[in-house]
Amino acid sequence: MKNYRITVNGNVYDVEVEELGEGAVAAAPVKAAPAAPKKEAKKAAPVSSGTEGAVKVNAPMPGKILAVKAGVGQSVKKGEVIMILEAMKMENEIVAPNDGTVASINVNEGASVEAGTMLATLN
């Protein structure tokens, strides 16, 4: 057995590795320090007015909603920021495709979305 100390993203782990003979394949038990518990984001129901508008605003790429800047019933102009989507460590502004009124917001802050997910609708 060989002991190693490994640092991953600032977390230190002590690991034991078993050496096997030539050509032998087996799973060795691994002893590691317990990982820090993951923080669970609150998952509330999406905010929506219950009606869907004619103009759909979809996610251009997968990511996480950092902020919702517009509310249901709010008038928006073409190009005005509706929400912020974080993707690949970049903050992307999701903007209104044309003038209108926000009919529904279908995601909450902190929600993970896939490309093509309907984020909001406008009338």
Image: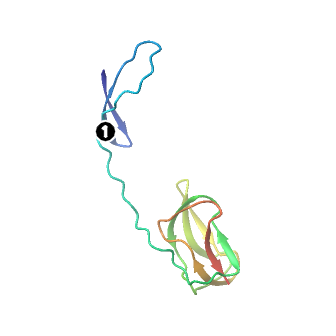
Q: Does 95 appear above or below 90?
A: below
Q: Residue at x 54, y 82 (%)?
A: 71
Please name whichever residue, 103 or 21, is drawn nearer the observer in this view of the structure: 21
Where on the picture, by quarter, is residue 15? top left
Q: Residues within 10 Å of mark 1 (few under 14, many from 20)?
A: some
Residue 22 at x, y percent in the picture: 45, 12
Residue 117 at x, y percent in the picture: 62, 65
- Name the amino acid, label 1: Val
Q: Does 2 appear above or below 113?
A: above
Q: Residue at x 63, y 60 (%)?
A: 115
User: Is residue 26 toward the left or the right of residue 15 in the image?
Assistant: right
Q: Which residue is mark 1?
A: 12
Total numbered circles: 1
Quarter of the image where the N terminus is located: top left
User: Is residue 49 toward the left or the right of residue 121 in the image?
Assistant: left
Residue 19 at x, y percent in the picture: 37, 18
Residue 4 at x, y percent in the picture: 32, 27
Quarter of the image where the C terminus is located: bottom right
Please name whichever residue, 69 or 110, is drawn nearer the observer in this view of the structure: 110
Q: Residue at x 40, y 63 (%)?
A: 41
Where on the picture, by quarter, is residue 54? bottom right
Q: Does 121 appear above or below 35?
A: below
The structure's colour scheme is rainbow
Which structural element holds mark 1? strand
